[in-house]
Image (cartoon, helix red, strand yellow):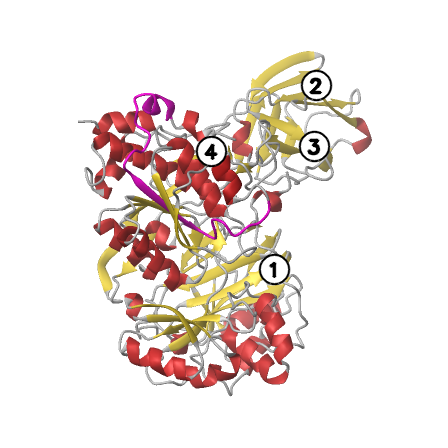
Amino acid sequence: MNHSLRHLLLAAALTLSAATFYPAQAQTALPKNLAAALQRIVELHSRDPQAAYAALKNIEGLPVFLRDREGQRPLVHINLGGKANLESVVASLKAQGLTIQATTNLGGGVIEAYLPLERAVEVARLPGVRSVTPVYRPARSVGAVTSQAVVAQKVLPVQQTGIAGQGIKIAALSDSYASSTQPPTAADDVASGDLPANLTVLEDLPPNSGSDEGRAMLQLIYDIAPRSTLGFATAFNGEVDFANNIIALREQFGADVITDDVIYFDEPFFSDGILAQAVDQVSSAGAAYFSSAGNNGRQGYLSQYRPVTAQAALKLVQSGSQNLKLQGVIAQGLALSFHDFDPGPGVDISQTITVDASAPISFQWDEPFNLGKVQTDYNLLVFNASGQYVGQLSGTDDNVATDQPLEITQLPTGTYQLVIAKANTGPAQQIKYIAINTAVSGEYLGGPTTAGHSVAKGGQSVGAVYWGTLLPEDFTSQGPSQILFDTSGNPLPAPDVRQVPQLSAIDGASTTFFAGGPGANGFPSFFGTSAAAPNAAAVAALVLQGAGGPGSLTPAQVYEALQSSAQDIPFDLDPNFAQAKLFPVLLTAQGDSSSDPNFFTVALSSAATGQTLNQLTISLKDTGLVFDPSTSSGFPFTLGILRGVSAGDVTASLSSDLSTLTLSFAPGSFGPGASAGFGIDRDYAATFSSGNSADLLQKARVSAIVNNKTLRGQFLNTYGAPGYDTISGYGLVDANAAVKAVKP
């Protein structure tokens, strides 16, 4: 299926002209501790209030703002920095007309409130307010019916002994539980037996404002632990409210196990933010916590800052090695120096990336959030392919004023050059960005992408393994994560390297309504680490019951039981790459695109003197995949780069069951040294979706006819030694082995 659909991306932002919004740095009259994104909205509101309200929903270069029901007040964080009295600031904010939604003393004190745009300047200047920053709509890790995880995670033998979650309370946090009014509704699921009637909801979204992904998560849990007691609270009313709901699910509902699938774009990379601290709090109180690792794949970047002076950068442009128009950003004070992306002897101050659909990017560096300790001002500058600076897509906050080592942007579909610039002489040196839940490709990528509360010490980060192949999904986020500061912003004596994800669980399983197309059983298939996290959490409930019930094990003991008993998952040392060697024929598959015309390359060795390739056949029957030549949901056979052979000499045919592709070459046309690139979509056979990584071709049978002699082989991956790895952790949860490990 289409790559962008497979990752269930956020909708692309409505493009507004550059004339409508000046880059934030131009708004010199507004307080610098008002985030640049809010400055854009406030400045527009002063000229055209209705346009500002529309921009809260769709604004070029930024994710969607969370806002009130009328759509006129954005949800914001008023960050106090640990020095102001929270109650007194709340009183001042109410006097300014703000509606307080949630408060916390975590993270130095944060107030979540709906901000009247006409009061933004006054609020930013209130005593005790360190900064005012927007709250963006968070991302979910998406990617009568029984989940396939019951079999793959070896749950049936446990249920047959009478262990089905009795006495254990499990809670989920996501967008909503019963917000959707489209059938089947939550009430329908209760009537069909897919959910219990006694489910507790602490907070939900209003009608028709959520997708009910939380309900889908609870369906997966209920299939594995059908005798457990279930609870829910939304994570979509802001980060502070999310943190408070994590705590409430333990303190009010009494959850023994909690799971979520949500990431906020401003969660710190190098320290534990308020959500991670909330996870640690409930874990210390006895609740095991399981969070989705994320669907960020290998779409991250991590490096030490390698400075190139502005003068040296201009010389690179003059030499023709860069096409960037840098004079404007230098003149505006956005760049004293630029980052060199090239880790070798060369110099490259831009990173070329291609965005397949709207891409939120969170860029951060090694300083603590909201505690008065940010000294470095980095900017994430976006240039188009021709080298023109695109200010409305760039992140240019005054980070010392906002007290956040953070720039957030959202890029529409296209090709861009990213430039990381330093606007002052601050000390921070480690830089990192993650493209969240999206399809981004380009140079210098491959850094760790698991971050935020998913890496909290008190919880478990969960990756996704597809039930049909028992291999990691290509989109599952990779670790590790490095924490450099304590919760007071003090540097740690040594980096706290967190080996995440710790576990993997099944995705692609069935629910009554969510979220992909129907699988072989006629029900929708729920993909992503959003599905994996609740599947792991449900097994934890079985482990708790098997050990003696609530409180019989600490969260750490639950985690140890799951990790030590997990089914090992092969770790691919060359991700998104597979080869079939049938000397003198070499067939290579590379990437994870569904529509790359050069995904496959077949070549005949130049040493094969006097030989010609007559035919090539690829059979997917042993892989759980099928070819999808559809022009609507897939990608038909397409030739790519051809060397030594002409397109007219190539004929392709598919078997009726879509399992086998055969290429025939005109006699004598494909000789030594010739090669042909070609592409065609691959899908999981059970769901007719996903299945695009080259790694999934493992054991696909290949035959080639050379000089009328048939050669046979198969696609192979290169796997590392068994044990922990940064994609699947300790492996796939095994309910049967884990329960046996803890039974008295």
**Is label 1 or label 3 in front?**
1
Is 675 located above or below residue 296 in the figure?
above
Q: CA distance from mark 3 to mark 4?
A: 53 Å
Is the Cβ of the residue at disc 1 closer than 8 Å to that at disc 3? no
x and y, in percent, of residue 488 in the image: 24, 67
Name the kind of residue labelled 4 in the image. Gly
Compared across the picture, whether 307 is left or right of 65 comes to left
User: In the image, what residue type sits under mark 2?
Assistant: Gln
Callouts 1 and 4 close, C-beta under 8 Å = no
Asked if the magenta segment contains residue 401, the reply would be: no
Crowding near pointer 4: few (<14 within 10 Å), some, many (20+)? some
Tell me the tag on residue 416: 1
- Examine the rendered structure and indicate whether residue 561 appears above or below residue 457: above
Crowding at dot 3, Cα within 10 Å, few <14 / some 14-19 / many 20+, comes out as many
Determine if the magenta segment contains residue 172. yes
Labels 2 and 1: the sequence-earlier one: 1
Give the amino acid type for the residue marked by disc 3 in the picture.
Ala
Q: Which residue is mark 3?
A: 676
Any part of residue 590 in sight: yes
The image quadrant where one finds the C terminus is: top left
* Residue labelled with disc 2: 611
Question: In the picture shown, does residue 263 fall above or below 717?
Answer: below
Q: Which residue is mark 4?
A: 193
Q: CA distance from mark 4 to mark 2?
A: 64 Å
User: Measured from the top left, where is residue 10 in percent x and y?
Assistant: 57, 54
Q: Residues within 10 Å of mark 2 (few under 14, many from 20)?
A: some
Q: How many marks?
A: 4
Q: Residue at x 82, y 30 (%)?
A: 648
What separation in Å lies between label 1 and label 4 (alpha carbons)? 49 Å
- Magenta region, residue range: 154-182
Viewer-nearest residue: 659 or 38:
38
Q: Would residue 463 be found to the left or right of residue 670 on screen?
A: left
